[in-house]
Amino acid sequence: MFQQRPQKPRRSGAHSWATWYRSGGLSSVVFVLPLVLTFLYFSWGPIVRGLVLSFQKNNLVQPPEWVGLANFSYVLTDPQLPQAAVNTLYFAFLALIFGFPVPLFLAVFVSELRRTGWLYNMLSYLPAVVPPVAAILLWKFFYDPSGTGVFNTILGWFGIGPFAWLNSQSLAMPAIVLEATWAGAGATSIIYLAALTGVRTELYEAAELDGAGIWRRIWHVTLPQIRGIILIMMLLQLIGTFQVFTEPFLFTGGGPNNATTTILLLIYRYAFINGDFGAATALSVLLAGVLCLLSVVYHFVTRRWSTT
Amino acid sequence: MTRVSRWGRRGAALGIAGLMLAAAGCAQATTPESGGGGGAGGAIDENAPVTITIGDRPTPDKPNDIKAFEQKIKDFTATHPNITVKSTETKWEAQTFQAQVAGGTLPTVMNISFTEPANMIPNKQLPDITDELKLVDLTKDLNPDVLKIVQDADGRIYGVPIDVFSVGLAYNRALFKQAGLDPDKPPTSWDEVRQYAKQIAEKTGKAGYAQLTTNNTGGWMLTTMTYSMGGSVESQDGKKSTFNDAPTKKALQLLKDMRWTDNSMGSNFLYNQEEIRQDFAAGKIGMVLQAPDAYDMSVKNFGMKPADYGHGALPQDGGPHGTLTGGSLKMISPKATKNEVVAALKWIKFDQFDKYTTEALAVQDAKTTIADKGFVGRPGITPLSQETYDRYNKWREPYVNVPVKQFQGYVDSTKALKLLPEPPNKGQEVYSLLDPVVQQVLTKKDADIDKLLSDAASKVDARLAR
């Protein structure tokens, strides 16, 4: 064994190198190298840079100063962090309860409509075409807290309200989730629709022969068939909602009373109001760590139900 | 092959790539060191060839401004042949400025807001230009009250203030008339503000008074109110908060009373600067704390009738205490060499200050402003001595297109009220921590002012200590 060992790899190595070279291995490396390097630099470069920044006191003008874990202990002891974390979780929770079933329902509904499906398809996707900033400003107008605001007027016809919407500590977050659900449902439902086309029609026929109504068909055929996509979409949504920024930033600026201050808004304030890039990247790294952990846990928890 | 070994290999490859990138990152991170030190050494040679870049070039939608701007550069280089001037459209915006500083893409000279130097000076993001200012003979012209904004504790100077305003009370003259109030007599005390607001709300159904609350403006305006009640927000050395006392409590109690007892503040309590100006211009708000430059946006962007705009003094409580000042200054890039600093200051003097002392330039400036639908004669505070400013305004009198009489209350206050600079340390951070305090008072009926302030004070003190 010991004598053979140094010889064997050398021989097989030389052999495979030659084969590799003859079969055009070098040109494929030359071909792929710029791509890989570009990818590494632009995709992973900022991540590594961020990691480096999180251990520094750095305003990017003065020479950086290594501060060890000081940035991490600073952001972890910031009295604003617990509230921001709770707000972010609350947003994720509301988005899961209200935002997650809507596109799924929409997709199943649209796929059931054979002839006019395209129309509903288009209607449901249309909100995704509106630029987020424009959409938010429009909804801000709808949420006008005075009695003459759009939503308050409509609710007033039924003798409800007026509500303070974004001006209320308890209503602000649900109001933001409502807009985010509206904005995101179309794009997500398109993905579900694509998955639904992959469901074998004979399963439905078999179910119909067995006397299954529409709800039982959805429950026993449709959902199990697309559960792989559902699981992935749920993970993507979780990661996405943990990084919510645009909506609270533009709707409320984090108010009232920090009721809509999310983790990302806090990161933004560290970086662009306080000019404290160390703290901002430290919190970003922590958030990324939590999300990685969440993904891994999610993977193991849902492996049993996964289709693959 | 087992799973582990495959992942092991990939992990190793990634690790190596990561290390390479980390090394690249470190190399990059150290580059500012060489650039930052550039301004430190070397003797000044006023005649050596030097190139400077100036920001704030007018955008292409203002052709007359561009023409004047380019002519100015030509005139300047004709008299200063060793200086080459390049220009960019880069300009200051609160949301992107830190990123620009961080990116190292700033021109040699550009305009920035008064809010910036307080953080930039201790961060060493601005060069010390005290000696160079003397060299180009600019120091003696500057208004010493205003100069405090760009000075450190030792009196060293880090920028050149060019445009100054103080906060006053913008009010809607049409709503005043509807409510039976005299539009030529804006309130000058907070008691009057409360009473007027109530009257406007009762007679017109509009908000009598509205308050800025989001994106740091809540803290900014609470600071302004605190100043007007004789208080302060930070100690002189910027190490401790000082707002947890009577003046700030009084300010918050006043807002609470107007909101919950009088119900004279309307229904929107999440206002940022642009939104409040929009609603003010639309006639939904009777009075709001603003600097007089609110006139420009209200009239030009939001279509307010000039006849409806009025601007009074910052209301005071118990004797004239003062008003908060803001404005813009010319900053010089921290990467500029000594020679570049001198060239930049010569340009600033030529560009910004010569018009105050040369009639032809003052008139020319007024004409181009009007040609681009700008405003001539909107009152402000002078970065120079009062008599120079008065003479300058006299030259421009025939071109004034702003109803200056409607600013009378404000104009009088600029001479009577002390100009108080913004908090010396981490001003914007302090403002952002005070935003929720104001929001809470306006959105929660049972808000406990004492507790809110003591909580905010402990948060602010922790930040100031970092």
Image: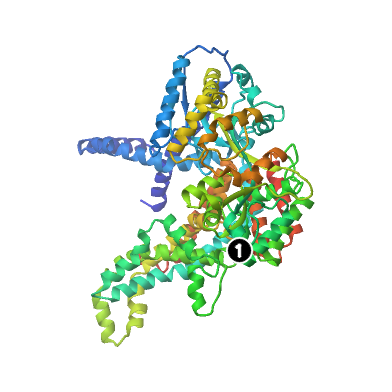
Furthest residue to the bottom? A211
Which residue is rendered at x = 63% and y = 36% of the image?
B381
Which residue is rendered at x = 45% and y = 14% of the image?
B81
Which quarter shows the C terminus of chain A?
bottom left
Compare residues A81 and A168 and report the one nearer the observer. Answer: A168
Residue B273 as seen in the image, left or right of residue B445: left
- Amino acid under disc 1: Gly
Q: Is residue A62 visible?
A: no
**Residue A306 in the image: above or below residue A295:** below
Residue B236 as seen in the image, left or right of residue A199: right
Q: Mark 1 lies on which chain?
A: B
Residue B166, image x, y percentages: 64, 41
Which residue is rendered at x = 66% and y = 31% of the image?
B386
| Disc 1 crowd, CA 10 A, few/some/many (<14, 14-19, 20+) | many
Q: Is residue B408 visible?
A: yes
The local secondary structure at tag 1 comes to loop
Which residue is rendered at x = 47% and y = 31% of the image?
B55
Compare residues B301 and B422 and report the one nearer the observer. Answer: B301
Place residue A210 in its image quadrant: bottom left
Furthest residue to the front? B398
Residue B239 as seen in the image, left or right of residue A176: right
Residue B27, image x, y percentages: 49, 30
Residue A260, image x, y percentages: 57, 59
Question: What colouring does the structure picture have?
Answer: rainbow
Compare residues B266 and B313 and report the one nearer the observer. Answer: B313
**Residue B382 in the image: above or below residue B314:** above
Q: Which residue does the numbered mark 1 point to in the structure image?
A: B266
Residue B335, image x, y percentages: 53, 25
